[in-house]
Each structure stands twice: as C-alpha cells, then as structure tokens.
Image (cartoon, rainbow, N blue to C red):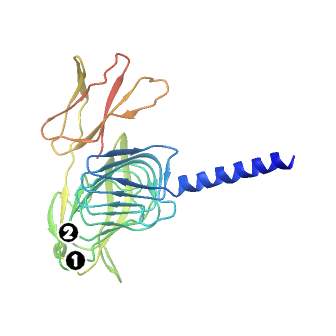
C-alpha cells in the first residue's frame, strides 16, 4: 500500500513538474518560421526575430515574464484572439482581436490597431501607428508620444467627428481639454468595426513636447466577394486599395467554426485575391475586413 501511494505521489509530482515546465515555456520565432498559437496553449513570453511571423489565434502569452511579446526589427506579430500582458514592437504588429492587460505597450516600428482590446495605453516612441478601431469597454484610452528627437506618425481612419479628413501638425490641433501630462486633442471618435458599426468614446493624449503630425482618413465600405473554382480555388473580391482583409473557411456552417486561410492580405488595387491549394468541395469561404 505504501509502494502504491509512493508511486501515485511520484506521478503527481511529475505531472506538476511537467505542468510547470509547460507554463514556464518561452517561445522564439526565427527567420523563415511562422508559428501559430491556438486556444489552450500557454507561454510565459515570446520573441519574434527578424524574418519570423507569430500569429496568436487563441491561448495566452505572458504568464510571468515581461514583456509578453517582443517583436524585433523585421519580425511580424498578428494578434487575432487570446490574451497577452503587453508587447514591445520594433517590427510590425497588427492587432485584430484578443485582449491585453492594463499594462502599456510600446511601439518603435509599425503598429496597426484594427480590433480587440489594446490595453490602456500605447507608448508611441517612433515609427507609425494606424488607428482603425478602439475597444468599446475602455472609456479612456491613450496614445502617449514622449519622444523629442523624432516625429512619430499617428494616423486615424474612418473618424466621424470634428477632426475631418486631412493632415494636422500637433500645434494646429484644438485641444478638447488640458491635463498635467499634456493635451487631449481628440475626445470622441466613431470607429467602423467588422460586422457592425461600433461607437467608442476615447481620450487620446499626446505629450506637449511631441512635434509630430496627425493624419485623419475617411473610409469606404467593401463590397461582397466572388470565387472561381479551378484545380485550386481562388477567392477574389472587390477591394479598397490599402485595406487589409482576412479570408476564412469552414467545412461546417452549422458549427460556425471558421478558420483563417493564411495571413491577412493587404489589397494593392481594387481587387483582392488569395488561392487555396488545399481546396475540397465542401469548403465555404468568407472575407473579413480587418479594419
């Protein structure tokens, strides 16, 4: 009986150790590698090196280590679903879904905010930040640009308020109110979101020593897509040049279980298309606008 109890105890300890190892794992994505993290997977942290692509389609990154995700120059991080604490980006980061903690993320490269919960603040040091969307569950969300040596670009898309389409220097913007840390130049924005119109109140602050420029762009809604069946299947749709789209497929419409077909595609003309070489006859496709 003691031997059996001892075996069970060893087994429990081994299981606990394996669980600790699994929860304590860190992820590194290297040159030429595309790594997809899905629901149920947990990592302490991730580093995306030059030439690597990390896609978060569920799961958790950021159990113990800070930051959750480090994107080095030349790396790419696509956030569709799941949970992270925060990121530090020097490459390309695209936020389409998921949720971040209240920690501030840092951008030094290219950042696209097109969905999900961006946390409470983006510290935008340099590079470009494109804002297509902000979370509706946050009544105050900030962009802070404390840099004095660079002029980082902040571009707002599909806004419907007093900040009309055009280009503005910081000094020409009329602040809505003043705070000790700087000015709030834009208080209320209506953002278009995939599937339905979504309105969110945001406070975007910029430190008073920032001398950058702000752009505001209009928005044109997409139209339905068409498909042509060949030995593979090509999915084509009328697009808006510069917009980003995600093609998805399912083999079970009743279950509503859609999966991404490859990476998001940025349209270079008025027509977007992708090719599915793993075509089977019972697949159904749809195209989502990522911003």
- Residue corresponding to mark 1: 210
Quick one: SS at disc 1?
loop
Q: Earlier in the sequence, mark 2 or mark 1?
A: 2
Q: Is residue 203 left or right of residue 103?
A: left
* Above or below, comparing residue 175 to residue 87 in the picture: below
Q: Image quarter for residue 194?
A: top left
Where does the image place residue 103, in percent across and percent down from the top left?
44, 67
Q: Residue furthest front?
A: 3
- Crowd tier of the residue under label 1, counting other residues whose Cα lies within 10 Å: few below 14, some 14–19, many 20 or above: many
The one of 270 and 202 positioned closer to us in this rendering: 270
Q: Which mark is residue 155?
A: none
- Crowd tier of the residue under label 2, counting other residues whose Cα lies within 10 Å: few below 14, some 14–19, many 20 or above: many
Where does the image place residue 159, in percent across and percent down from the top left?
26, 55
Q: Is residue 176 left or right of residue 117?
A: left
Q: Residue furthest bottom?
A: 180
Q: Of circles 2 and 1, which is in front? A: 2
Q: CA distance from mark 2 to mark 1?
A: 9 Å
The one of 249 and 59 positioned closer to us in this rendering: 59
Residue appearing at x 81%, y 45% in the figure: 4
Residue appearing at x 51%, y 60% in the figure: 63
Q: Residue furthest right?
A: 1
Count the marks. Answer: 2
- Residue corresponding to mark 2: 152
Quick one: SS at disc 2?
loop
Where does the image place residue 281, in percent across and percent down from the top left?
34, 16
Where does the image place residue 73, in percent across and percent down from the top left?
24, 61
Q: Label 1 near label 2: C-beta < 8 Å?
A: yes
Residue appearing at x 42%, y 23% in the figure: 251
């Amino acid at each position: 009986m003691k031997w059996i109890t001892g075996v069970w105890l060893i087994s429990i300890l081994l299981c606990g150790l394996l669980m600790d190892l699994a929860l304590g794992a860190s992820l590194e994505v290297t040159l030429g590698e595309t790594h997809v993290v899905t629901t149920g997977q947990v990592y302490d942290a991730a580093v995306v090196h030059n030439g690597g692509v990390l896609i978060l389609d569920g799961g958790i990154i950021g159990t113990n280590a800070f930051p959750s995700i480090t994107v080095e120059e030349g790396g790419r991080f696509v956030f569709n679903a799941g949970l992270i604490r925060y990121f530090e980006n020097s490459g390309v980061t695209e936020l389409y879904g998921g949720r971040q903690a209240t920690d501030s993320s840092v951008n030094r490269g290219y950042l696209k905010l097109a969905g999900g919960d961006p946390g409470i603040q983006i510290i935008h040091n340099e590079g470009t930040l494109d804002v297509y969307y902000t979370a509706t569950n946050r009544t105050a969300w900030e962009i802070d640009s404390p840099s004095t040596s660079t002029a980082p670009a902040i571009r707002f898309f599909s806004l419907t308020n007093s900040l009309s389409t055009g280009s503005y220097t910081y000094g020409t913007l009329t602040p809505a109110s003043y705070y000790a840390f700087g000015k709030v130049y834009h208080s209320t924005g209506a953002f278009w979101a995939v599937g339905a119109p979504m309105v969110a109140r945001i406070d975007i602050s910029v430190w008073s020593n920032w001398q950058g420029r702000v752009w505001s762009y209009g928005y044109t809604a997409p139209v339905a897509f068409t498909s042509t069946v060949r030995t593979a299947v090509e999915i084509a749709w009328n697009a808006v040049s510069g917009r980003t789209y995600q093609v998805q497929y399912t083999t079970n419409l009743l279950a509503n279980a859609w999966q991404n077909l490859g990476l998001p595609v940025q349209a270079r003309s008025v027509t977007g298309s992708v090719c599915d070489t793993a075509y089977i006859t019972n697949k159904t496709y749809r195209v989502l606008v990522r911003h």
